Image: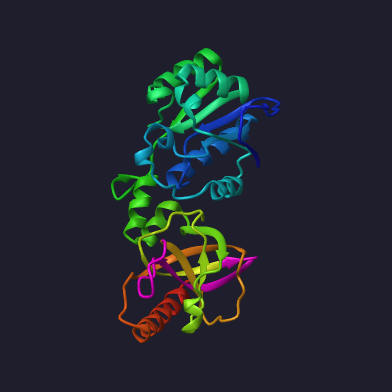
Amino acid sequence: MKLLTSLEAAPEVAVGRAVTIGKYDGIHLGHQLVLQQLLDEAESLGLDSAVITFEQHPNSVLNPQHTPLPVIGNSQKQELLEQFGVGLELQLSFDIWFASLSPRQFVEAILVDFLKTKLVIVGDDFKFGAGAQGDLAELKSLGVEFGFDVRAVEGVLFDGRRISTTLIRDLLDQGEVVKAARLLGRNHKTTGVIEHGLKIGRKIGFPTANMTRDCEGYLPVDGVYAGWLHCEGQRYPAALSVGTNDTFQAVPRLVEAYVLDETTLDLYDKIVTLEYIDFIRPAAKFSGVEELITEIKLDVEKIRHRLAKEL
């Protein structure tokens, strides 16, 4: 898959493109339905496929005080789109210029002139242009004028609610990683570099790998999770802990992983992916080291049992 991050150099195309547009900050089952139709139609019509998405959430410009964190980061998004089979990702910076484009300006400058679009596939609640003033009806009208077709895909429901990134974020905020996985069509993951920490875990016999705060992939509610740690093609069973480690001293909120039965594994400065399988217990503050060690041992046995079901 080719990645473009600006409108400076128009990509070559032989016959035109099938395009979808959206934040795609979760690539959940609803997004996947749109993407699958995009790829099916592109293949049927002999078109190249492209996804227009954004480097940051539009609220970072439109409403900075209420900018939600993405469920997946940009590199995670790129990897998922590539796995899906998308030919081109146009990842635009949602800035003042972009936010000011009228529906017509957006269509003419980006869809027509830049991407040579012949087909647009979007969700049935799609809005675009300055102030979100453009809707599906206007997009279809502009399609007739500029020579591209428009098709809408209905949203996917879960327990009577439309699947959305907001719904998935709410589930993760409750520790509901199993339900979130059902909506994502995959287990939720956090990816980042392992950094040197206080090494408290090593001193009590449970060395943990601390992930940097600039990691990608939304952190679920504070607590302990059963999961897998992926590094350099290997998968390890792990206890994942999200929180601030108040038993010893307050530290910025992070995720750390203890690889079961491993005390010498060196993960420092390596890129690691943590995969959440199930919620084990909420975060807690313990009265001392012995109480903490006792609880960690209980956690490890619960996690070992839970992960055995995944083998």
Residue 214 percent across, percent down from the top left = 51, 54
In the displayed structure image, the side of residue 67 where residue 264 appears, left or right? right
Image-quadrant location for residue 254: bottom left
> Number of callouts in the render?
0
The reply to whether residue 163 is in sight is no
In the displayed structure image, the side of residue 50 where residue 100 appears, left or right? left
* Residue farthest along the top direction in this orientation: 145
Q: Is-magenta flag for residue 285? A: no
Q: Residue at x 34, y 83 (%)?
A: 288
Identify the image quadrant of the N terminus.
top right
Q: Is-magenta flag for residue 237? A: yes
Image-quadrant location for residue 153: top left
* Residue farthest along the front direction in this orientation: 249
**How was the colour assigned to the protein in this rendering?**
rainbow
* Residue farthest along the left direction in this orientation: 160
Image-quadrant location for residue 287: bottom left
Residue 2 percent across, percent down from the top left = 66, 39
Above/below status of 289 relative to 38: below
Residue 135 percent across, percent down from the top left = 39, 24
In the displayed structure image, the side of residue 233 where residue 155 appears, left or right? left
Q: Residue at x 51, y 49 (%)?
A: 73
Magenta extent: 230-252
Residue 36 percent across, percent down from the top left = 53, 41
The reply to whether residue 309 is in sight is yes
Above/below status of 306 relative to 163: below
Above/below status of 138 relative to 274: above
